[in-house]
Image: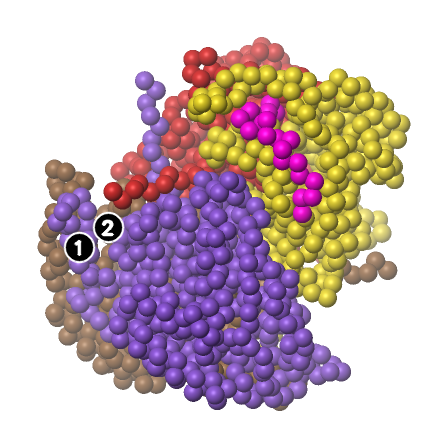
Chain colours: A brown, B purple, C yellow, D red
């Protein structure tokens, strides 16, 4: 209950601190027989790595460079999951703890330094400890296992694709999945991406940072996933996404625009599939892929508000513990140095996909017990 | 894992269908010794009742009229909780199942009829069964118990206040808590409320409905509540709120506006409390009351996108099961009759407060094990 | 986490006190489509009722007489479960709270009065509150739902049969299931039952009570149920049974006798089924039906040590809270009056069966996600 | 829900296979501020190591020799827990997978080979995979963290001491804790230990093995730990102990002897502590330290039936998968070779202590929310 496990049946537990020896993950509840090799995980981890988007070092990236090699420690035998826990380990090879010595007694604005100190009585000040974005490497690794399960169970039509819809005030005017990995922002529009980069370069020159909006689309999900009442599919996705430190909001389908719509314009009509009268389609997808918290079979669509990176290089007002009396504070000014992203959106994109996989894998397994077949007659 | 329980330590399980005999709740994990009488629960339930807001029957309200009397069946002895499960029962006294007979084979657009049928193989068609807003009566009852715990533990400064910020395209220009219960929309601005009512009357005359935005502010919460990583306070609140069928989005603090902000303008500065140098305040609250998913001690603020009520009185395109062959469908047109809200916002307001109480009660109990005092020395 | 829920996927939560208004149960996680009517539950509840065994009022029985009528409040529609929570309510019609007024400040030896008072700071002194055997009525009701699921899923071969193997020092010499419901002790041997009754009559005349041993055999369980490591099938059954207040021990298969055996005499050999070489049988069942915590397909067999009923009519040494100073105690003598069982074994028998059903229903559902079928190819 | 996590609030998840690269553990929910160094864990692991009891290589031991060095990977900073997950890793340095090649298609009697194969569809045949006793190294490591918490929270009076009470048919006649670590059987009686060794040598010469009984006594536990109804302290201990593959039964206090006792002889009387009238003692401890599943403050005492080691060197009857048709079986005879214990009792002793620590740590944390202090008045 200490908050380091995600999922009810497909359970990911992460461990490790930003500047400790490792970050790692244990996945419990992955069914037996799922094909899985380290390369499936490494591919996703590589996408999360600093600077490893758009093929070039860019204004959006940070300069921390971790090899992020993932080891599978258990739960896989002869290329398949065995049904036992899959433990994954990523060594921290580039952790410069000394960078953070000057932050030992100071609370960085916009970070969790203060709230961790209040909660636990003391904290690991090296790079934010558990609250660092570094922890999301373990999520990405776990998400790759979830994706392997979903590909096995739902087929190749399953996918979750996230991209930067907006950054530094500039929005994609088209959505072209094929260009996402071709620009440093992971935007879905090359022209917008170029303008985002320009704007980010300007902010970075001022020692400042930018926020943005990420959109995610999950397709190939059959109708019927999600639990009613409290564990609705959208509720679980909302929890998954808000568990990312930079996310300040989420909306599904028409989202906040729904507020100004009428029922007659927002309801999605049902129609019989002309090719097969045992199938139903929705003519629109204002609901974003769920009704009553259960998937409709249409694409699941949501957007995330991403706050600007709090680590900026301008001087900020904050407090520090008094050196002779750590229970008392004094005002101070802080100028952060080191390596930080100018806009976190492109690095969060693979994490959003990973959290989508994890949520859907859990919901998929949970759906297995909604109804059960009767025993065959004895004769 | 079937989704009918909310919370990890303060656990609410709800049961009952819209048109069954009862809706009810079991709260497990409420500590012993909390003062609780039926009136504490009844007061909140009365606020959720149809038409029972603003003192008058209005265009926003539905015409279903349930007495909604709550019985405490267990867990309370001589006016205090005993530490054992608190079971609450509300009889459905006004359930007209026959109203729904014509919906037996039809899927209402915007409702969970279709997805429930896919998930479970069949469904209780009477009024939506578990997916009905009726289920939220049990949440409101449970939320009252959570509120009693928080008032006991955190003191009288604790409160959660929700209100309609926007409805049918009209937004409050001021926020005055004292008027919320004085208008039918539960808006925080009487003038805006009047215009919302006018606009709703216009829509209702067309057989249509409207959406809106609800804002909620939680105050009196000390710094340090929330679990790191997956069970962040804002993640749990997001799940709680998205578990309400009408909610299509949530944002905290500056929310989606954060996307266009820079770090230098969005970071909330820390300052030492001038009156007590062992205390810290935040000079702004763009973060909405949490950092790293843990409460800062400032007000927790979030806004919810509420979709228009899907039950409209215009004809809609949908499908029905073929009478001779229930596995096959045919297109049909549907015109819903009966009693329905024109805008659900005012009725959701007390439910949003209840879900806030439930989330915070759970987080409060979870915080009890973050650190533990050392045993006293033996001599 | 307050201990009132049993099971991970098939979840039973009970509520209600011995001398409150009701005892009740909510079952969450029961799949949709299981045939269930009140009579399925009532039949089991009737077996648990005081004096309702062996057809006649006997020395083993207590004189409390509850009608124990069970109502299904939710989760069942047109004779089948809907997949939503099944709530069950049993009104307490014969609760004489006044019987317990003299026990308000006194701790009964062998009861939970003292430990509840320490744990919660105060207690519901009426008849033991939640620690009373009365709570098991809710378990029996929930167990009937679990049994319905297992009969549906595993077929009519599934059954769990418990009986009194030993009571008041007398042991069954034969095991004949057909006589269990024909004698007041629910023994599996009529001759032994008669001698148990004689011995109990003797003890009762002295105001004393007796213990015994219950055996339970579960058959029709396929190989493969149970989770490895911590949630072994036998571990979960042990927890289930030790959660009954009167149970002081459990053993599986050869149990404590295994301690003196050798590997060569205790290992159960595997043999190919002569009729079908894709099936395996065990030639003996010393392991009691599980290997590595997973069912073998053989009968699951365990035995329970049942302590004598602590409510005896002899004078006992105990303490009471001082009337002027409830934080301080004084020694006192106590003579309990009222209605109590002379030997609890026959009344526990249906509860043991219920807990077996609940454990196996949970394990059955959990087994649904051990492996999952691959998606069919797309063409 | 796949069974690899123990505990509700103090949660241990283990991973790793007998003949994989590692076994490991993640502890989530350990409060912040508990002093912990690797040596605390190593000390317990060393006791579990093969042959590392009694100071000498003995007939009870196996010949597998793992260094079992434990690394703390996360969750500890400057010698104290931080409140974040504590990950522990133990490399398998002496895993001879080739020893098991001949077992690829064969099911060893008394082992989980068959049931795992049925459950998962296939299995890691190398040394039993997860079902191996090797997995308990991770439990012992986790138990050391639980012990550190309990020593911090309850003080130095807290301890759990297990010992071999009986082995190969020979029982301790005295119980002297000081000799437990001085003999190879971890018996509490040196003279009995010598005779056990003799008897084991005789069995080993015949290629056979022996079972036994382990007793465990937990002291320094205050009254009030344990949750009512399903999660009784004794129920959780029973689950913990039955989750050990070799354990076939458990009894508390008078245990199975209770069956033949009367209420008047078994009830433990309460008396006021002569030195302090706010304290209560029990004059006897037939209940074994719990009443109604909650600790009484007396010693918690239980005994475990340990089955003989199933890996014997005599020929045994079993089955194997047919080489051309793995879905079909054929009868075969098997003679196991390699390194195996003659009696597992001494090696289980530290594991029993670890599981006791883990159960009590969880129950201790759970007790923190049974009641909560009221907020101080505002003025």
Q: Which residues are magenta?
A: C91-110
Q: Residues within 10 Å of mark 1 (few under 14, many from 20)?
A: many
**Residue tagged by mark 1?**
B270
Quadrant of the image occupied by residue A110: bottom left
Disc 2 versus disc 1: nearer the observer: 1
Answer whether residue B238 is visible to the viewer in this image: yes
User: Which quadrant, please, contains the C terminus of chain A?
Assistant: bottom right
Towards the viewer: D211 or B260: B260
Taking D64 as reference, is A316 above or below it?
below
Residue ID at (53%, 16%): C331
Verify CB contact (< 8 Å) between mark 2 and mark 1: yes
Left or right, residue B238 beside residue A74: left
Left or right, residue C168 beside residue A102: right
CA–CA distance in space, label 2 to label 1: 9 Å
Image position, residue D129 (x, y; %): 56, 44
Q: Is residue C103 magenta?
A: yes
Q: Residues within 10 Å of mark 2 (few under 14, many from 20)?
A: many
Towards the viewer: C142 or B199: B199
Towards the viewer: B191 or B200: B191
Q: Is residue D130 magenta?
A: no
Quadrant of the image occupied by residue D165: top right
Towards the viewer: B211 or A233: B211
**Residue tagged by mark 2?**
A114
* Magenta span main SS: loop
Image position, residue A233 (x, y; %): 49, 66
Chain ID of residue with mark 2 = A
């Amino acid at each position: 209950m200490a908050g380091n496990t995600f999922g009810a049946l497909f359970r990911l537990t992460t461990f490790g601190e930003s500047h400790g020896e490792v970050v790692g993950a244990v996945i419990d509840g992955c069914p037996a027989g799922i094909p899985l090799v380290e390369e499936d995980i490494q591919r996703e981890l590589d996408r999360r790595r600093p600077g490893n988007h758009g093929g070039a070092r860019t204004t959006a990236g940070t300069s921390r460079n971790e090899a992020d090699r993932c080891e599978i420690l258990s739960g896989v035998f002869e290329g398949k999951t065995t049904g036992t826990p899959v433990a994954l380990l990523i060594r921290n090879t580039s952790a410069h703890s000394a960078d953070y010595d000057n932050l030992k007694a100071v609370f960085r604005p916009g970070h969790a330094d203060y709230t961790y100190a209040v909660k636990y009585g003391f904290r690991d000040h090296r790079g934010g400890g558990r609250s660092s974005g570094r922890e999301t490497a373990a999520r990405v690794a776990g998400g790759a296992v979830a994706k392997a399960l979903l590909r096995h169970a739902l087929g190749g039509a399953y996918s979750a694709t996230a991209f930067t819809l907006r950054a530094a005030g500039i929005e994609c005017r088209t959505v072209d999945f094929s260009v996402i990995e071709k620009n440093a922002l992971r935007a879905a529009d090359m022209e917008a991406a170029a303008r985002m980069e320009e704007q980010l370069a300007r902010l970075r020159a001022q020692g400042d940072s930018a926020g943005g909006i990420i959109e995610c689309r999950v397709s190939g999900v059959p109708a019927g996933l999600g639990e009613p009442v409290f564990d609705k599919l959208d509720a679980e996705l909302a929890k998954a996404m808000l568990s990312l430190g930079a996310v300040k909001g989420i909306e599904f389908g028409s989202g906040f625009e729904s507020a100004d719509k009428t029922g007659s314009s927002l309801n999605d009509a049902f129609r019989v599939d002309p090719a097969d009268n045992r199938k139903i389609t929705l003519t629109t997808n204002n609901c974003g892929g769920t009704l009553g918290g259960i998937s409709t079979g249409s694409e699941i669509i949501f957007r995330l508000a991403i706050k600007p990176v709090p680590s900026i290089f301008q001087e900020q007002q904050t407090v520090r513990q008094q050196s002779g009396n750590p229970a008392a504070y004094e005002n101070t000014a802080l100028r952060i140095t080191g390596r930080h992203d100018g806009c976190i959106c492109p690095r969060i994109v693979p994490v959003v996909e990973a959290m989508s996989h994890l949520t859907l894998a859990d919901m998929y397994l949970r759906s297995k017990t909604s109804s059960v077949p009767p025993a065959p007659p004895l004769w």
